[in-house]
Image: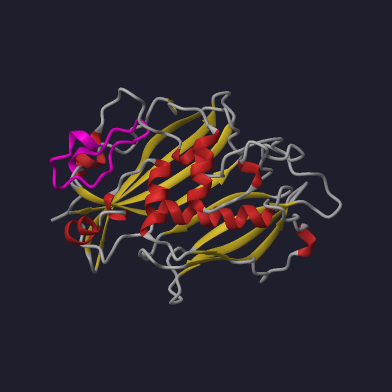
Amino acid sequence: MTNRSTPRFEDIDVGFELPCLIKGPLTTAHLMRWSAAMENWHKIHYDRSFAQEHDHLPDLLINGSFKQQFVMQLLKDWAGAEGWPWKSSFQFRAMNKVQETLTVWGRVTGKRRSTSYGLIELETGILNEHGVESTPGQAVVVLPYRDGPPLPYPFVAEE
Amino acid sequence: MPLLSPEILAYVGVSTVTQFACDPVEQGAVRRYAQAIMDDDPNYGADAPTNTPWAGPIAPPLFPNHAQRNALGTPDIVQQRAHDPNFDGTGGQTNGLPPIEPLKNFSVLNGGAQFELYRYARHGEKVQVTQRYAQITEKTTAKGSMILVTVEAEFRTDNNELLLLARRTLIRRPA
């Protein structure tokens, strides 16, 4: 929704790739700022000796809760103010360590018509600078038809 | 030897009464949150445009998922466990769900989540949540055994309007 116009359902084809979102490099300051913003004091994100010596992790970890914000931002920004980032799910399959730069991506895998709007199915993920995928997922973004009504807000599912 | 015990499985189905966030969605908290996730969406500011479906300042989509904080005067787990070398910093915010006692000293990792978003929280609203332990299973990998704890949560406004449904998986491993 950040100053981006909403695409119409008819204008999007399977295979379309969303503009990627780049985050990073994510430093200890980024991780501490996120921990403070949500008041979560899990030490594996800011206490290196605890992370490595107690929890046997390779380094400070980028929070899963942090990464999920980026996926939602990707979907929200692409949907624009007239679309709706309805569903998002993902697994944190690999760790992302402090200082990594993350590329958040999405690709259209399917389209479904509902009565008054269209549903865009996507696969999503987060790659680090080495091309390692850490957060595979799926999403559904709702888009209006070209000559259709505005989406209901709050969103109401028709299916 | 399996990690999963009847004592742990007894938590499946345990749910909370509705918990209200101790603070409303306030401008400063939204600003800090938006700056932390580096999302400078103009809809998050006090001077947000009003010609949008939500008609004014809102919080980021997943803000309700992190809205539960420890109110003043409630137990301070950071201080309570300050001398415990095994304390990992977690456990203070359970959104009303009782911590799973046998897993007290297990490490915690975020395994993933599913979200369904229905509406943004507006500045000034209070977020309420109900949660339950939906599933607890054991999984064995090359790195050893782990417990997977799945928690379902429903977030609403103080006017009972649905904001967000969440289902998240926590990975618990022996420390």
Q: Picture coordinates of residue A101 (x, y %)?
A: 46, 68
Determine whether A82 is above or below B12 in the image. below
Majority SS type along the magenta span: loop
Whether the magenta-drawn stretch holds residue A79 is answered as no
Determine whether B8 is above or below A147 in the image. above
Task: Place residue B122 in its image quadrant.
Answer: top right
Side of B160 where B173 appears, left or right = left
What residue appears at the point 38 percent right and 47 percent down from the top-left corner?
A35
Side of A52 where B93 appears, left or right = right
What residue appears at the point 56 percent right and 26 percent down from the top-left corner?
B160
- Tell how many labels: 0
What residue appears at the point 36 percent right and 26 percent down from the top-left corner?
B71
**Nearer to me, A138 or B60:** B60
Task: Place residue A112 in its image quadrant.
Answer: bottom right
**Nearer to me, A125 or B68:** B68
Side of B76 where A102 appears, left or right = right
Kindly tell me whether residue A63 is visible in this rendering.
Answer: no
The region drawn magenta spans B78-102
